[in-house]
Image: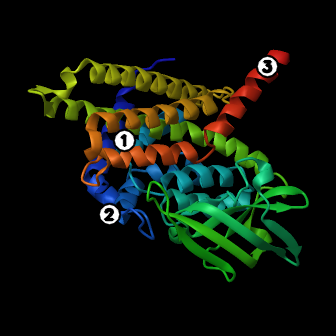
Amino acid sequence: MDLDLSPEQELLRDTVRSLCARYADLAVVRQMEDDQVGYPPELWTQLRDLGLLGLCIPEEFGGSGMNAVDAAVVSMELGRALAPSPHFVSCVASAGAILRGGDDVRARWLPAIADGSAIVTPAWLEPDGGFGPEGVQLRAETEEGGWRLDGVKRHVQFARAADRLLVLARMDEGVTLLLVDPAAAGVELEQQKTVASDTQYRVSFTGVRVSEDDLVGEPGRGWAIWDQVMHDGIILLAAQAVGGARYALELTVQYSKDRRQFDKPLAAFQALSHYMADAVTNVDGAETLMWEAAWTKSVGRNIDRLAPMAKLNACKVFRDVTAMAQQVFGGVGFTVEYDIQLYFRRAKQLQLSWWDDRYLEELVAADVLDRATA
């Protein structure tokens, strides 16, 4: 595995970093906190014009067909900037599920996701349901020409901005994926408050009708599709965590050089310098594991262990680095005027979302134990 980026990948990295600096700097991040829509349209337009909305979509459906390493380069920069956008939920998670659906649903939705004219977001988690398939209890009862949905989903990101919700519902056959219009009769959106102040909704379904044309894949195959999508997607979430952790460390190092106490900079105190030495070691390790997972995916090898390991480690490092940063900054680090609190809050949010550390540990442990007894 070559850990050096190609010239094209370096150009991609620099382009996305420049785009984020111009259209999604930390002032914009602050403006988007608890916003009903949750992302600036200018950023979305620029991502579209660069072909980055279709990075996980094959060229035959209007995407750019990037491999996992290219996609990780983009995700690292989005994570570094804390860029507020539905890029992951629509262009990675939902697009990945639709890509594994039937020909008709692919032809209808993938080109629209790639050109930015449609946003699709997963409606997955339920109250007290957990991250596994048993947590999906929202019912889809068969009716003539389709189904009727009843139940509640939580933590649905960018639901008000979405053209469709990718709903994980339970039928007699098992978990199934359905596309639902958030403006349909019987759908109610209630914005939630989160530790990261990002845009999430509680979505209630009361007698919501869904036609057979909005089925993604086959009835009962929803969890098999979703599990594959998640294994691919969490590599890019690991990249976001690494990007955020590295920039949070840069902010901390610079502050430790600028802030003086007892007639010398904070960086001159051995205890703090050791904190930052440990942090850079951990960030480099998390990045290496993330690149290994992305490369393994790009060459078509099994990622069942590497993908959970990458997110588990990267999110832990992101959380630990930002917690260390708060100690270096002291009390001012928690005030809204300082940028480090943005990273501190989002590190915890990312660690809790899209398979939390406990679920990831169980996946890794199961893989280790199953291999050991095979």
Secondary structure state at the residue bearing disc 2: helix
Is 275 located above or below residue 323 in the figure? above
Is 139 located above or below residue 25 in the figure? below
Whether residues under marks 2 and 3 lie with C-beta atoms below 8 angstroms apart, the answer is: no
Q: Amino acid at mark 1?
A: Arg
The one nearer the camera, 288 or 66, is 288
Q: Position of residue 73 (x, y in %)?
A: 43, 36
Residue where numbered disc 1 is placed: 80
Q: Residue at x 57, y 46 (%)?
A: 352
Secondary structure state at the residue bearing disc 3: helix
Q: Amino acid at mark 2?
A: Gln
Residue where numbered disc 3 is placed: 371
* Residue count near mark 3 (Cα–Cα under 10 Å), binned few <14, some 14–19, many ≥20: few
Q: Residue at x 65, y 43 (%)?
A: 230
Secondary structure state at the residue bearing disc 1: helix
Q: Residue at x 73, y 55 (%)?
A: 129
Does residue 273 appear left or right of residue 172 in this picture? left
Q: Position of residue 19 (x, y in %)?
A: 30, 49
> Label 1, label 2: how many angstroms apart (C-alpha)?
17 Å
Q: Position of residue 13 (x, y in %)?
A: 35, 37
* Residue count near mark 1 (Cα–Cα under 10 Å), binned few <14, some 14–19, many ≥20: many
Q: Amino acid at mark 3?
A: Arg
The one nearer the camera, 85 or 218, is 85
Q: Quadrant of residue 272?
A: top left
Residue where numbered disc 2 is placed: 31
